[in-house]
Amino acid sequence: MKNLWNKVEKSKSAYIALISIILVFIMPILFNLFHLGRTNRIIWLFFVINILFAGFIGWFTRKYHLSFFNMVIFPVIFVISVFVKYGKYGYFLSGIYLVLSILIYFLFDNEN
């Protein structure tokens, strides 16, 4: 188990995947536990927190010179969760998250 965690610590892509799983699968459960309504969940989780995280992924990918495909991890995990339990609007949100990540990625382009 310790070797597995050491491999995860070295991989920045694993961090992106773990945070994505927490945001997509765990946070909605926490919102329900605290009796926050569906509207609050959609506004705060899907539009505020996830959009900020999508921007962070674009910046993080550029800063650490990660593969461009690291920006696809979060939208793909989000599409999986949408397929399981949310409405069709989630597919559009995953596209927005991807486009935002790409825009932030190119916004922080290295001047070298």
Image: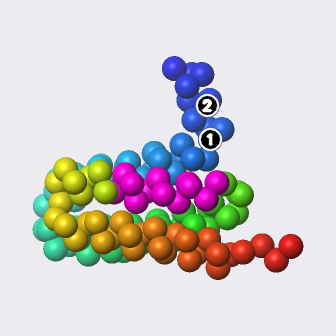
Question: Which SS class for mark 2?
Answer: helix
Q: Residue at x 66, y 54 (%)?
A: 66
Label tally: 2
Q: Where residue 106 sits in the image (x, y, percent)?
A: 64, 75
Main secondary structure type of the part rendered in magenta? helix
Q: Is residue 49 visible?
A: no
How many other residues sit within 10 Å of disc 1, few (<14), some (14-19) or many (≥20)? few
- Amino acid type indicated by mark 1: Ser
Is residue 15 depicted above or below 88 in this figure? Answer: above
Q: Is residue 111 left or right of residue 108?
A: right
First to last magenta residue range: 67-78
Q: Is residue 109 visible?
A: yes
Query: Which numbered marker is on residue 7?
Result: 2
Q: Residue at x 16, y 65 (%)?
A: 87
Q: Where residue 99 sits in the image (x, y, percent)?
A: 47, 73
Is residue 74 depicted above or below 106 in this figure? Answer: above
Query: Which numbered marker is on residue 11?
Result: 1
Q: Residue at x 77, y 73 (%)?
A: 110
Q: Residue at x 16, y 74 (%)?
A: 39
Q: Nearer the viewer, residue 41 or 74?
A: 74
